[in-house]
Amino acid sequence: MYLRRDRTMIAVVIMVDVAFHAGRAGLVSGADIAERAGLARRGIEPLLQALSRSGLLDSVRGPRGGYRLGRPARDITLDDVVRVAAHDDAPEAGPEGHLFERVISPGWKKLDELVGKQMAVLTLEEMVRRAETSGLRRPVHEPISFSI
């Protein structure tokens, strides 16, 4: 379930992007997420909907709408995100045969379990910290001020 599945990788990118750029207070548009990730908006829309239905994202409609985290970043693990993305994922056709069934598949399941344990403790908050440590800067949301 964890090892290099495009749909799950994109879901993680979406969630880390929202955590980094919007958090729980601000909003980020689906178009901005798609642009920063180099993806087509229509391609990520089903994932945005699935993440919203699961409660991991809040969706706000309207001209100034967008997405924000449904829970604090410290309370959302990568495992939560992957499970939502993998839930709708159709099973892939794969190899068959004795070597696959007796050697590759059991070994792959063991690796998957190890990765799953790590993803269960890795939060969006930690991923945002890693982004900041790597030199990325979070956007500063300036308050609106009016002068008359």
Image (cartoon, helix red, strand yellow):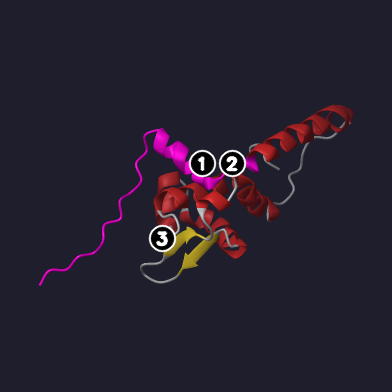
- Earlier in the chain: of badge 1 and badge 3, it is 3
Residues under numbered marks 1 and 2 in contact, where contact means CB atoms less than 8 Å apart: yes
Q: Is 58 situated above or below 137?
A: below
Q: Is the magenta stretch mostly helix, strand or loop?
A: loop
The residue that appears at 45% across and 45% down in the rendered structure is 37
Report the disc number at residue 122.
Answer: 2
The residue that appears at 78% across and 33% down in the rendered structure is 110
What SS does tag 3 mark?
A: loop
| The C terminus - image quarter | bottom left
Residues under numbered marks 2 and 3 in contact, where contact means CB atoms less than 8 Å apart: no
Q: Is 82 situated above or below 131?
A: below
What SS does tag 2 mark?
A: loop
Report the disc number at residue 25.
Answer: 3
**Measured from the top left, where is residue 32 in percent x and y?**
39, 53
Q: Does the magenta stretch include residue 122?
A: yes
Per the image, the residue denoted by label 1 is 126
